[in-house]
Image (cartoon, grey):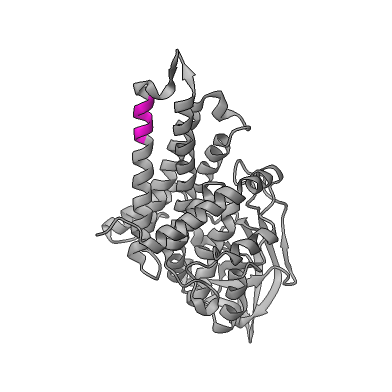
């Protein structure tokens, strides 16, 4: 068992860190102020430097590396901000991976190379007004009619909604009950009948657009059916990698917070001494460091155990749950140590604190990850509908 990164992995992480720290802070500030997504010219720059589709097969324009390499880059970008990291997140751990594994060859060839070149961003659309945690309660329907699929319904909380160029829509594709009737269909943004609600105003995640999606007789070719009815387990298997991406975006907030507060407590003086000279501060720093390193190891283990595929639901849920809780704890402790400076919008700490809370909601809330963990421990799924 080797806990060291390879020379190539270290080089990739260093290259990502150098680019992120030298080029992205000003962009991060702009996205935070305007709540707009990263402009297309920046996304193209990411692609030119090899930061998109890192773990996508080279046949489709990716680098053909593993999930760990993708997560290394996501972490370095997300330490600057989640908004500047989001295109990397979507190209490496988002719905593109589901399309790569389960989509038709025609759809793969049309979509994936454009994601890797920075010409497209693909978002996932899962939740609905009455189906978030209870995802098997989806009401949006897709009806197969000859060589087309016709979709009707409304989706909620789509990160990338209104901005992304294409959407993987989870929907009900048959009358079979619960999960047995659910699959997923890919839809281009400009497809007639596809419209979007107003942009959400969220506590954090500024620069990651989110909106409702409405489908009114949206008609697409049947080869855009990615997973047919009865394939819900496949969709969740593909989503296990997105959990690791979520965990990494979350972890990055804690890592950056710890780096900043470590510098701060050495510079800031009270009672004639640097804050770091007080034992209470030392204990707090040590606790934060332990949590950050433990979260990173859980994420790396999930990625390493996945090989070239998708991590297990147990590994990915452990990583996401612990990283989400760690991010909230560490950013909160860092903000407290910095006092009024941490609470000020002139400092990055308050943004990290707000974003940290968001990652523990997105992609399956923290408590749902704990249910997943317990189910994996016991060896069966629990029916939450029973009292």
Residue range of the region highlighted in magenta in the rendering: 281-287
Residue at image coords 43%, 22%: 275
Q: How many marks?
A: 0
For residue 104, above or below residue 235: below
> Image quadrant of residue 186?
bottom right
Residue sticking out furthest to the bottom: 146
- Foreground residue, 328 or 41? 41
Q: Is residue 261 left or right of residue 199?
A: left
- Foreground residue, 368 or 299? 299
> Image quadrant of residue 372?
bottom left
> Image quadrant of residue 302?
bottom left
Residue at image coords 58%, 80%: 109
Measuring from the top left, give residue 235's x and y in whole percent: 47, 68
Measuring from the top left, give residue 87's x and y in whole percent: 59, 59
Residue at image coords 49%, 29%: 264
Q: Main secondary structure of the magenta part?
A: helix
Residue sticking out furthest to the top: 271
- Foreground residue, 323 or 262? 262
For residue 203, above or below residue 226: above
Residue at image coords 34%, 51%: 297
Q: Is residue 136 left or right of residue 209?
A: left
Q: Quadrant of the N terminus?
A: bottom left
Res 126 visible: no
Measuring from the top left, give residue 88's x and y in whole percent: 55, 60
- Foreground residue, 175 or 296? 296
């Amino acid at each position: 068992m080797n806990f060291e990164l390879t020379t190539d992995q270290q080089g990739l992480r260093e290259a990502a860190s150098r680019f992120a720290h030298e080029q992205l802070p000003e962009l991060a500030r702009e996205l935070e102020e305007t709540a707009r997504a990263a402009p297309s010219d920046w996304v193209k720059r990411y692609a030119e430097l090899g930061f998109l589709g890192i773990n996508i097969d080279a046949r489709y324009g990716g680098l053909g590396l593993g999930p760990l390499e993708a997560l290394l880059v996501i972490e370095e970008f997300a330490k600057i901000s989640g908004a500047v990291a989001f295109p990397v997140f979507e190209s490496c751990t988002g719905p593109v991976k589901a399309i790569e594994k389960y989509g038709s060859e025609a759809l793969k060839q049309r979509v994936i190379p454009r994601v890797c070149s920075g010409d497209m961003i693909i978002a996932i659309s899962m939740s609905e007004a009455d189906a978030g945690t209870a995802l098997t309660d989806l009401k949006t329907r897709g009806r197969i009619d000859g060589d087309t699929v016709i979709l009707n319904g409304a989706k909620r909380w789509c990160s990338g909604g209104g901005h992304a160029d294409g959407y993987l829509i989870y929907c009900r594709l048959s009358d079979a009950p619960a999960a047995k009737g659910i699959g997923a269909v890919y839809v281009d943004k400009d497809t007639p009948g596809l419209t979007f609600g107003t942009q959400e105003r969220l506590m954090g995640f500024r620069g990651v657009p989110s909106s409702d999606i409405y489908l009114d007789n949206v008609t697409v070719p049947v080869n855009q059916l990615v997973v047919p009815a009865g394939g819900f387990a496949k969709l969740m298997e593909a989503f296990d990698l997105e959990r690791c991406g979520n965990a990494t975006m979350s972890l990055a907030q804690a890592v950056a917070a710890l780096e900043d507060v470590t510098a701060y407590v050495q510079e800031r003086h009270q009672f004639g001494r640097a804050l770091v000279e007080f034992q209470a501060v030392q204990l707090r720093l040590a606790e934060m460091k332990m949590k950050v390193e433990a979260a990173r190891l859980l994420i790396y283990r999930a990625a390493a155990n996945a090989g070239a595929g998708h991590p297990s639901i147990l590994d990915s849920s452990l990583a996401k749950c612990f990283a989400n809780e760690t991010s909230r704890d560490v950013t909160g402790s860092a903000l407290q140590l910095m006092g009024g400076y941490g609470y000020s919008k002139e400092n990055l700490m308050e943004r990290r604190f707000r974003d940290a809370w968001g990652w523990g909601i997105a992609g399956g809330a923290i408590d749902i990850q704990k249910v997943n963990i317990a189910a994996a421990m016991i060896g069966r799924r629990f029916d939450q509908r029973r009292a």
